[in-house]
Image (cartoon, grey):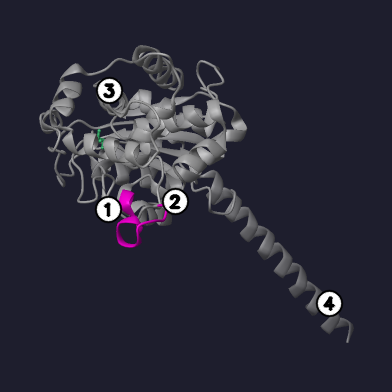
Amino acid sequence: MRETLFVQRRAWLAGIIASVGLAGLVVTAQQAAPDPQTAVNTAFKQFQTLKEGKNADYIPALAKVDPNLFGIALVTVDGKVFTAGDIKTEVSIQSISKVFTMAQVIQEQGLESIEKRIGVDATGARFNSIIAIEGVRSVVGTGAPEMNALVNPGAISSTSMVTGATSDAVWNKIIGFHNDAAGRSLSVLQDVYKSESDTNQRNQAIGALMYAYGYIKTDWHQAVDLYTRQCSIGVNARDLGMMAATLAAGGKNPVTGKQVMDAAKVPGVLAVMATAGLYDDSGKWLYHTGLPAKSGVGGGIIAVSPGKFGIAVIAPPLDDAGNSIKAQRAITAISNALGGNPLAPRR
Ligand code: GLU
């Protein structure tokens, strides 16, 4: 009897030792997660030679950008910068600017300003859809469309909401906000601005329609022009990584230390990015990464792991949805290697 008890105790003890050992192993595995530079280098090597997709060409200047351009920048919320590839060459920021102009309006006028005037829902339509503006109105004569500030109609409207007595005054605020998030003085790529201004008749139609329906309450020509200019701001991968990190760090640029927007307002910005950041593939992207993100047809993508890091990749060839192929693959690989998914259990 005694012996049986002894054997039972021994088995019980062995069980405890085994599970403690297992827990130890799990901890070791977690500690063995790669450091950011290794994760960045590995993804760079893995995707460098990928030759899929095609530069956007509906804005003629974008077709001329080097399709082999590939740069990665990850910036932690405590200001450490990890990079690979070309982080100096600038491309036009394009739709990624929509995030920062929306953020600026939210900062100035509150979270409800964007929600009330534009909305925060997915449109279920292309980024420059006119049907999305019409919504059910064209069928039943009334009814508000589903809209958000990351598709063109909402973005042109949010640009129109930035206050200022003159076009220059509004522009200085828009570029100033982008500068603060990037931590340096950015400028417009004039060839892209001209190319897009010459070919943006569809965006002009969207601006006119948004004015007709009361979303734009100021000069819509000015709103479309400033929107086109903000899309032509030149950024490199490091700039975009810094802008993403500013959102990851609760609105504070982690290198300059400047509080660009109130921390309490950042989650609203991230929510719209999570809903509509990657065009028609926003759901798919969120499913695989959990990261609020925004892509632009210039080939950049920014993604935000709140409280941890911001990451950006520039690689111009896009997939059918309009998102950079290499950028999606590299960000997914790096973030998942570093435990960046905010929807996953904390580790
Ligand atoms: N300036 C571009 C346009 O309005 C931005 C498109 C984008 O990057 O999604 O068409």
Is 2 placed above or below 39 here? below
- The residue sitting at 83% across, 77% down in the picture is 6
Amino acid type shown at disc 1: Ile
Measure the alpha-carbon separation of dots 2 and 4: 65 Å
- The numbered mark, 2 or 4, whose residue comes first in the sequence reads 4
Magenta stretch in the rendered image: 132-144
Asked if the stretch drawn in magenta spans residue 142, the answer is: yes
Label disc, if present, on residue 6 of the rendered structure: 4
Q: Relative to the observer, which residue lies in front, 10 or 174?
A: 174
Amino acid type shown at disc 3: Arg
Do labels 2 and 4 touch, CB within 8 Å? no
Instruction: Provide the residue designation for mark 2.
Output: 121
Label disc, if present, on residue 229 of the rendered structure: 3
Q: Secondary structure at mark 4?
A: helix
- The residue sitting at 46% across, 44% down in the picture is 272
Q: In which quadrant of the rendered view does residue 212 lie?
A: top left
Q: Mark 2 vs mark 1: give the one in front.
A: 1
Q: In the displayed orientation, state which residue is furthest to the right.
A: 2
Quarter of the image with the N terminus in it = bottom right
Instruction: Decide if residue 289 is in sight here.
Output: yes
Task: Tell me: 308 left or right of 66.
Answer: right
Task: Tell me: 317 left or right of 335.
Answer: left
Q: Secondary structure at mark 1?
A: helix
Q: Could you say where residue 87 lies in the image, as x and y percent from the top left? A: 29, 24
Label disc, if present, on residue 131 of the rendered structure: 1
Q: Relative to the observer, which residue lies in front, 36 or 153?
A: 153
Q: Mark 1 vs mark 3: give the one in front.
A: 1
Q: In which quadrant of the rendered view does residue 194 lie?
A: top left
Crowding around mark 2 (Cα neighbors within 10 Å: few <14, some 14 to 19, many 20+) is some
